[in-house]
Amino acid sequence: MKKTRHGLLVVVSSGSGAGKTTLCRNLLLRRKNLVFSISATTRSPRPGERDGREYFFVSEAAFRAMRKRGELLEWADVHGQFYGTPKAFIDRMCRAGRDVLLDIDVQGALQVKRRFPEAVLIFITTATFQELGRRLRSRHSENAGEIRRRLADARRELIFLDRYDYEVVNDRIPQAVKRLETILEAESLRIRR
Ligand code: 5GP
């Protein structure tokens, strides 16, 4: 009998505004075996975001309680808010042979890699930081101080680039999505693990 293949853990990080969310959405549409890991966060929902779709929006007390109960695979303080990955969903999906996509920051990605060395870490970059600044500002969802903070965080994150398995430059969305698909295709054919 054929053994069910264990799903891949695919971690995608970037500096804020590198277009990662768009790439993830496109990738999820194209790879039916891939599911999105919905994180818990203490930050407030942005317009258009829905609880249980983009994130589980929780209070700080609820977040701490999840952490204490050991329900998070990893967690981090990002831009002054807590973010964490619920563990149960990932366990269930991977056991069922589904690949799971985690859109998380560098601190979280490195925690995942430590626990699961077979996780595939992908870093999305943009051509330049000017471009990053422009994209952040055109999103109109953060004020100037917040933008400066996110740019500084992004610069810091780049230091960790060499801890990732792959770098995908998001110059044009279709090409970047294609590269992500190629990575997942190759990783799913790997003899291993
Ligand atoms: P945003 O608030 O813009 O949605 O996300 C801010 C940052 O938090 C992004 O870099 C995103 O990848 C990261 N993030 C989202 N969920 C998680 C999570 O569960 N854990 C960690 N470590 N980072 C997360």
Image (spheres, rainbow, N blue to C red):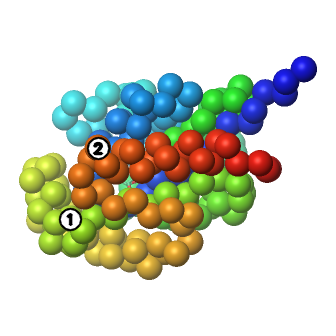
User: Mark 2 or 1 closer to N-term?
Assistant: 1
- Image vertical order of residue 19 relative to residue 29, above or below: below
The residue at the point 49 percent across, 57 percent down is: 122
Mark in front: 2 vs 1: 2
> Where residue 78 appears, x then y in whole percent?
40, 60
Along the line of sight, which residue is nearer the eye, 57 or 114? 114
The kind of residue on which mark 2 rests is: Pro
What distance separates the C-alpha of mark 2 from that of mark 1? 18 Å
Q: Secondary structure at mark 1?
A: helix
Residue denoted by label 1: 132
Mark 2 surroundings: few (<14), some (14-19) or many (≥20) residues within 10 A = few
The residue at the point 79 percent across, 50 percent down is: 192
Image quadrant containing the N terminus: top right
Q: Secondary structure at mark 2?
A: helix
The kind of residue on which mark 1 rests is: Leu
> Where residue 157 appears, x then y in whole percent?
41, 72
The residue at the point 78 percent across, 27 percent down is: 4
Along the line of sight, which residue is nearer the eye, 41 or 162? 162
Along the line of sight, which residue is nearer the eye, 153 or 102? 102
> Could one spot residue 60 in this view of the protein?
no
> Is 29 left, or right, of 115 in this rendering?
left
